Structures are given as structure tokens and as C-alpha cells.
Image (cartoon, helix red, strand yellow):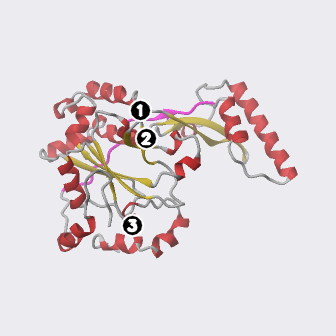
Amino acid sequence: MPHVITTSYLTHDAIQAHLRTERNYDYPGPLLLSLGRSIGLRFVPMERDLRFAWEELPQQMLDEQAQKVRDSLRTTLIAWARHMGEGASYTDNVPMQCLHPVGHWYEIPNMMRNGTLLQLFQERPRLKYLMIHNIDTTGADVDPGLLGFHIAEGAALTTEVIARQVEDRGGGLARVDGRLRLIEGLALPSEEIESLLPWYNSATYWIDIDQLLTMFGLTRDDLTHTERVHNAVRTLAARMPTYITLKDVKKRWGKGQEDILPVAQFEKLWGDMTSLPEFPCRFVAVPRRRGQQLKEPAQLDGWLRDGSAAFVESLCAWDH
């Protein structure tokens, strides 16, 4: 039975048994697409970042000749970074290789900036709560029991977590400076520490909209003021950690020739909202079939064997 990681307990399975015959949800109205409003420009990595990634992090050792080739290539790429200017904007490529998404922290602020949240309020003035989840969290649905817990706790944000297994890579639940919060794997000094976190972030969130707007210094009426919303998003974004990651991009020279170059990009992640002391958050453990993320085809066999596929099938009547 899943349990709430606070002083309360939630009998999720009991609630499901009571509601199983009442799952005929009605979602009137058209699908609203929230358009992106934030994009980043990649930049030339620092030599120190490349040396850390290639020389200090664990590496697979190749045979002698292959290792010499790889080391020579990396020496050349470090020299390329120095020549291009460490930290300079990366523009020496086609636009799609120079630009990048700036992390899922911006996806909910995008709803404020692009008018989607305002349109939802106009169509449903009594709307108070949002449920947000990753598209690869296939078992997530609008669960009345979890919504009821979120409302009863008066939380601004309730996050679903699952018991970590070996294949779960990423952030988790931890107590940092006495505060229970999500912490990203990118913020931890080693993968060993990440593996010790027993609860894995499923990236499914229940949100009290008005408390969220208050966190941004906004009200519902402010959503009609574009510049006010933009400034509010920038102000809160400045409080969020920024993670720098290395990515490979292709530089095509024509006639089938191309180079693979390392570039750097930045991201901000939504789970770091739980670090804000004035933002009341709760965390609830849910069954793995609801919270596990299906990120690659190699996971399909396990997903089928452990009952997750059957659970997704049971959520509603699918049109095959």
C-alpha cells in the first residue's frame, strides 16, 4: 500500500476500489496546446568542463589504438573550444543545432506567458487545480484520491514519487538543510549519492493555481498584462538553479562530411520549486505502475512483465 511521506497516510488502493466503477471522466472542450515561449542559445564549453567530463568522470577504456585515437580527438576538440572562445555563443552552425530548450521549469510559466492559462480561466472560471506530468509517465491519470489529498493538505504543490529501482536515473526526495525537497541528480556530486535516495521523482505534480500565481507575485487578473507576467517569470527564474550540460552537435561540411562537436547548454528544472521555503509542498508515494517513466524501447519488456501495461489498459476504454 502506498503511503504519504508526511505525518499523514493515504490509502490509495482503498480509494481506487471505491471509485473503480466511476471512472467515466468527461473532458469537454478542445485540446489546448501550450506553445513554447523560452529558448536558449548554446555556447562553446569551457576547457575545464571538457577535461572534467573526459578525464575525471568514469570512462570506458578502449584498446590501445582506439584509446589513442579518442585521446587525440579530445585534445583537438579542447583546442577548438579555446580557439572559438570559451563561453562564447555557439552560432557557427545551422540554427537548429545552435538553439536548445531550456528545461521543463519553463513549461508551466509558458502557460502564463502564451495565454493558455488565461484561456483556461475564461472557459472554466472555477478552475483551481492543475495536474502536470511527463508524457513518458504513462500510468499517470487524474486520480480523485490524490487530488483530494492535495486539497486537504492545502499544499501549493504535491509531487508523486515512487520507490527507486536500479534503472531509475535522476532526481529524488531528500532532506536538505532540514527541509524535505526534491533534488536533481545534476545537483549531486556523484551517482553513488543519487542511488542512495530511496524515493524517485516521477515528475507528476498537483498544483494549486492561485498559490502558484502568488509565488510568482501574480493574480489571475494579472495574466492579461503581458509585460507584468514576463517580469514575474524572469524574477522567479533567477531564484532557480541553473544546470550546465554538455551535448554533441553535428556540423555538416557538405559532400557527406560532418564533425561532431561538444557544446554546452543550460537548463532549469521544475522539481527545484520544492526548495523554496515559502512554497508549501507535499510528497506522496504511489505504486510503480503509476509513476515509472517509459523513456526508451529497451524498457518495454519489463513494463509489460511487471503489470504496468495492464494498468494503463485499465485506466479507460482505448480506441485501438
Q: Is mark 3 on a helix, strand or loop?
A: helix
Kindly indicate whether the residue at mark 2 contacts the one at mark 1 (C-beta within 8 angstroms): yes
- Does 255 sit above or below residue 17? above
| Residue 84, picture quadrant | top right
Looking at the image, which is closer to me, 3 or 84?
3
> Which residue is rendered at x = 21% and y = 42% of the image?
119
The residue at 39%/60% (across/down) is 291
Give the CA distance from mark 1 to mark 3: 31 Å
Amino acid beneath label 2: Leu
Q: Position of residue 67 (x, y in %)?
A: 82, 48
Q: Disc number at residue 240?
A: 1
Can residue 188 be seen from the camera position used here?
Answer: yes
Query: Is 217 situated above or below 24?
Result: above
**Which of the marked residues, 1 or 2, is nearer the chain's N terminus?**
1
Q: Name the residue under label 3.
A: 289
Visible residue check, residue 36: no
Against 145, is 50 above or below? above
Q: Is residue 54 left or right of residue 174?
A: right
Of callouts 2 and 3, which one flags the residue occurring earlier in the amino acid sequence? Answer: 2
At which x and y percent is residue 98?
56, 35
Q: Position of residue 152 (x, y in %)?
A: 18, 51
Which residue is nearer to you in this view: 189 or 48? 189
Q: Magenta residues: mostly which secondary structure?
A: loop
Taking the magenta stretch, the answer to whether it contains residue 229 is no
Q: Mark 2 points at which residue?
A: 269
Using the numbered discs, state the Cα–Cα distance from disc 1 to disc 2 in whole angstroms.
8 Å
SS of the residue under disc 1: loop
Query: Which residue occupies the foreground of this view, 118 or 313?
Result: 313
